[in-house]
Amino acid sequence: MNVKLCKNSTDLRLYKALRWYNAVKFMKVSNDRYILDARGYACPYPQVFTLKVIKELKENSIIEVLVDNPASCDNVPAAVRKLGHEVLEVNQEGNYWRIVVRKR
Amino acid sequence: MREDRISVFRERLDKYLNLGINLLSLAIGCSVKVDLYDTLYPALSLVNNEIAKLNIEIQPREDVAVLRSNGDYSLVRRIYDISGNGVNKDELISINPSVALLLLQVHQSRASSPKEFASSIISLYRRLGSSPVRVRIGKGHSIVSTKEKAEFALIDFIGTKSGNEYLLANNDTIQIIDPTEDPGSYRQVATAVSNALNDLFIKGVYRDITIYPVYDAPIEDLREKLTRSFKEFSSKWDFQLNANVIQPRVNYLLMGATVVGTLDKEPPMFYDNIKAGFKILVTRSFGELSIISTYLTTHVDESIIDELERNVMSIEDLEKLKTKIMDSLSRPNIEIARVISKYLPEIGEAFREDEHIAATVDVSGPGIFVFKELAEQANVDVALYNIPLISPEIAKFAAEHYIITDATAGTNGAIAIVASKDVIDSLIRDLRGIEDVQPMVIGEVMGRGSGKLFVPDYITRYITSKSLLMKLTMNIDVLRSLRRQQVRCEKVRVEARVLGNVQGVGFRPTLRRQALSLGLTGYVRNLLDGSVEVVAEGCKEDVMAFIEWIRSSPVGSVQTINYMIKQYYGEFNEFEIR
């Protein structure tokens, strides 16, 4: 299993949400800041994963989504915006994009 | 029941993950091909000048290669790495191909920008274009993989002698059509090959068809399954199969074919004869991929099932619908090809509008976008008054949930036919009764024009991405950069200031995209006073078209544009946002 999320009590629901996507890396980097690494996944999974995870986060949490599928760099921001979350940044970093979202 | 289905799916995911393939990394819809508008065409414009110097010819966009032929041909397949290492000049001379069908599999990072893609393909083009034999690339088709080190260039060189009929050849592949079924199953392969055949069928080809399979798999067992499915498909539908061609072995999943067939009529490519009042008929509804993708997504995110069941239909009904779609996708549209061929002129005869089909198009991968491409190719304006979808409810659901970017897309889908009203009426009678065919008229040609497409407003239910919608209705001539290769032009430079509400509205990226599609170089930048500075270089005609386009920009609002035409410097290599 590559899921790098700790199985502690507060994050258990998150852990469950993603537990069987063996290769998705989901990390808590600090209090209320997370990284979802969806690189290597084709459309539509990056947005499906993002929406699934964001549902479980506390308001104002920050999640950084990494995608390398060109279509997803449009779709992930569009999908989270539609649900009222705030897209803070979309940066191309070499061969992938980092999409920074604040949960609303 | 539900638990069973999902656990079978998860087991399959695990099984393939252990073999090094993540089924969820395979594109079934929105991302399998290098995007024509965002990447491929702009990339070709970036390397236009260099391609013009090579002994190579890129055919204008026509999905299938069409050659005059005496019926005999040879097909030689070579596989290179994507920079074309191994292309051998002497061999090219001895093959002396009439046309080369090119299939590129590139890592998705190379498709991330036109510049990146251009630098990936130019080396292959250089190698193909530096022999004394002129290589005509009849069909270039680039697919993206999510796995690095799974790249290759497969080229089928086809040689034939000119004669009294036509030889048509096409190459198409998919990665997988339905990950909820076994990857080696008959229906996956049958759909992939039928999809490749569809481009021959639309031209009326149904005789002497040979299938040259293209496939790859991570393990021998699956490779054998695929081989068996190719055989089963060919014998079931009575096509010849030539399995003695080499296959790429990069241990990724891929299935499809190069298909070759002959036509003893004039192919329906009478774009210049299309007139106001001609009707557009489709052979059935479209949007197959929205159904397959939605079904698949319910396996990945169970919370979607509840929402689906509350708003659209039960998961059982969706499953039934999905199975029906898979059955229909795995049947080749050969009966339609027979009908089309009846309405084509004999060899050497001219097109007559009261008897013949003017043009046809395969409504598959790009969904409704094919009508935009058709309008541009034929230089006509087209109005669609109906967008028939297999399940409008699922299409809407899939678009709303970002399951698919264009819910009108399909694979081995409907065939669209453009002809005069009388021909269309007669076609409808002939097409009725063919399994899975429900002919209907969905639009008409408004007249000669610049390639505008008018669609009903409710299209926004099925395509939620604004940038995609803009491409559908915006008037960009995507073929211009390809056409210009053959034409010399007067080069100029323009320096412009654009005033109005032009900052903070996505003005610069939109301008850049338009500039690239026109093959212009230069830059655009915001000035402190709220205006935008544009400097562009290129063919005079394109530069002027660019200025006119800025005046009526689809984003922001332009008050004034002050510009000066100056001497061309050749200062830039690309069009950038500063």
Image: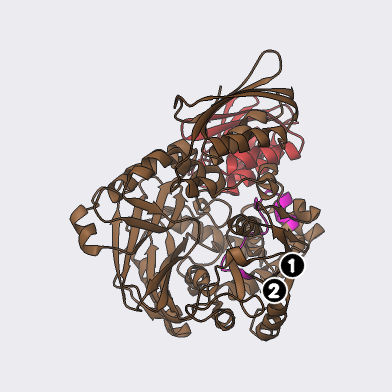
Q: As drawn, which residue projects farthest toward the left?
A: B90
Determine which residue is flagged by label 2.
B420
Q: Colour of chain B?
A: brown
* Disc 2 and disc 1 in contact, CB within 8 angstroms: yes
Name the image quarter holding the N terminus of chain B. Answer: bottom right
Q: Residue at coordinates 74% horizontally, 65% vertically from top-left?
A: B443
SS state under label 1: loop
Few, some or many residues within 10 Å of mark 1 (<14, 14–19, 20+): some
SS state under label 2: loop
Residue A63 is one of the magenta-drawn residues? no
Q: Calculate the distance from the C-alpha at mark 2 to the C-alpha at mark 1.
A: 7 Å
Q: Residue at coordinates 74% horizontally, 30% vertically from top-left?
A: B556
In this view, B288 is above or below B166: above
Determine which residue is flagged by label 1.
B277
Q: As drawn, which residue projects farthest toward the top?
A: B528
Q: Residue at coordinates 32% horizontally, 46% vertically from top-left?
A: B54
Which quadrant of the structure image shows residue B135? bottom left
Name the one closer to the observer, B312 or B389.
Answer: B389
